[in-house]
Image (spheres, grey):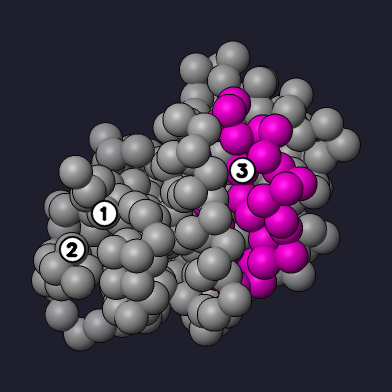
Amino acid sequence: MKTSKILCPSIANLPINGDYADHISEIDESGIDIFHLDIMDGMFVPNFGLSIREIDFIRSKTKKLLDCHMMIMQPHRYIELLADHGIDIIYIHPESELIPTETLDKIRNLNKQPGIVINPSTALETVKDMLSIVDWVMIMGVNPGYAGRDYLPYITPKAKAFHDYRIKNNLSYKLVLDGGADAKVISDLYHNCGIEGYVLGKQLFFFQDKPYKNCVDYIRSI
């Protein structure tokens, strides 16, 4: 039986203005599954992301899961901080740590769900020994650091390879696409490659001139 889509709107797309709280509440009630939060340090990627203050605000407005995509160097320094501020799923880039497995174990020991992020240049072979100790694998469909980029078509066979490896080795990690998730990409990866999770951005969710719930209903239908 095919797993239902896991929808994770990327809150970095929201402008910080007077309507911010209303947007968070509407998103919370739209039928999404996880709030996707990005932290960036300007070093691992050339950009900056959400602050702890914003994370606290979002946490106060929803009981849904919060995930955090850590696009920073040496993320082990901030794992406890994120756990204390209500993050449920913590993703790290293996390349950002000297000993990534130790950081993943630390996340697990804090009773949080560990995940790894697969950059376009990261091969399955280089991370397969970590796949038995994570709950989530996020596959970047774009180079990380900026919103709104187009999907890189050569990611599709890699995405399917992670699904096939999961089946072959009886593993249970969930697969999520981050970046370039338009209707064609979601339909292809969901129906043909076994990818159940999607980080949602400007292509189908934000700035659509219709309620977030309508966006969710459409994405679930494709």
Q: Residue 221: tell me if it is visible.
A: yes
Q: Which mark is residue 150?
A: none
Q: Which mark is residue 116?
A: 3
Residue at 30%, 51% in the rendered image: 6
In magenta stretch: residue 131: yes
**In the picture provided, is 221 more to the left or to the right than 167?**
left
Asked which secondary structure carries label 2, the reply is helix
Quadrant for the N terminus, please: top left
Quadrant for the C terminus, please: bottom left
Q: Position of residue 40 (x, y in %)?
A: 67, 57
Sort mark 2 into few (<14), some (14-19) or many (20+) by Cα contacts within 10 Å.
some
**In the picture provided, is 184 more to the left or to the right than 106?**
left
Q: Which residues are magenta?
A: 116-145
Residue 77 to residue 18: above or below: above
Which label's residue is closer to the chain start, 3 or 1? 1
Asked which secondary structure carries label 1, the reply is loop
Q: Position of residue 129 (x, y in %)?
A: 70, 33
Q: Which mark is residue 5?
A: 1
Residue 42 to residue 31: above or below: below
Q: Amino acid at mark 2?
A: Arg
Mark 2 and mark 3 residues within 8 Å of each other at the beta carbon: no
Q: Amino acid at mark 1?
A: Lys
In the figure, residue 167 lies in which quadrant?
top left
Mark 1 and mark 2 residues within 8 Å of each other at the beta carbon: yes
Asked which secondary structure carries label 3, the reply is strand
Mark 3 and mark 1 residues within 8 Å of each other at the beta carbon: no
Q: Residue 71: tell me if it is visible.
A: no
In magenta stretch: residue 93: no
Q: Amino acid at mark 3?
A: Ile
Sort mark 1 into few (<14), some (14-19) or many (20+) by Cα contacts within 10 Å.
some
Q: Position of residue 107 (x, y in %)?
A: 60, 25
Residue at 67%, 33% in the rendered image: 130
